[in-house]
Amino acid sequence: MATGSAPMQLQLRATIRMKNGHCVPRKWIYHLTEGSTDLRTEGRPDMKTELFSSSCPGGIMLKEMGQGYQRFLLYNRSPHPPEKCVEEFQSLTSCLDSKAFLLTPRNQEACELSSN
């Protein structure tokens, strides 16, 4: 997560491994709203995102809400985040009334983040 190219903007870049094994770069641009904790996702007017503070190094926690859904996400630079990070995330989601927790398996190496 970094500042965007304009004021009141954040940019999240990642490289995601698809089901076919290929790594695909992705970029999300979030717009900050004055007087609100909600972030608006560029190109997705129906979606709101909240960013949560975390003591986990190299990680961020967020909540996405859209038309009829909400989900909590933990992103970490490490393919195997420390157990305390996962526990902190589970605690947060439990306090916010999330009933299900899914931990995706890491069967392959992490994708390299491209520099562009």
Image: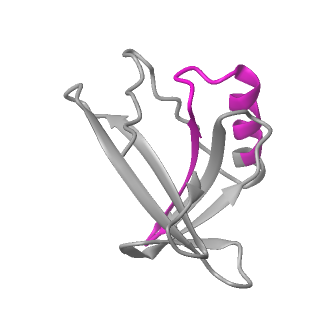
Residue at x-position 77% and y-position 40%: 91
Instruction: Find residue 18 and report its horizontal and vertical position in percent.
Output: 27, 34
Residue farthest to the bottom?
34
x and y percent of residue 96 in the render? 73, 55
Q: How is the image coloured?
A: one colour
Residue 23 figure quarter: top left
Work out which residue is located at the far left of the displayed protein and give it: 20
Residue sitting nearer the eye, 3 or 65: 3
Say left or right for 31 vs 114: right
Residue 93 at x, y = what percent? 69, 47
Residue at image position (57%, 20%) is 80
Left or right position of 78 against 91: left
Residue at 35 percent across and 49 percent down: it is 26
Q: Compared to 104, does 15 lie above or below?
A: below
Picture quadrant where residue 51 is located? bottom right
Which residue is drawn at the image coordinates 78% and 50% (left, top)?
Answer: 95
- Residue 71 vs residue 6, the one in the foreground: 6
Q: Which residues are magenta?
A: 66-92
Verify whether residue 70 appears in magenta.
yes
Residue 67 painted magenta: yes
For this rendering, which residue is in front, 99 or 41?
41
Report how many numbered discs are placed on residues in the image: 0
Location of residue 92 in the rendering, given as x and y in whole percent from the top left corner? 75, 46
Above or below for 38 versus 53: below
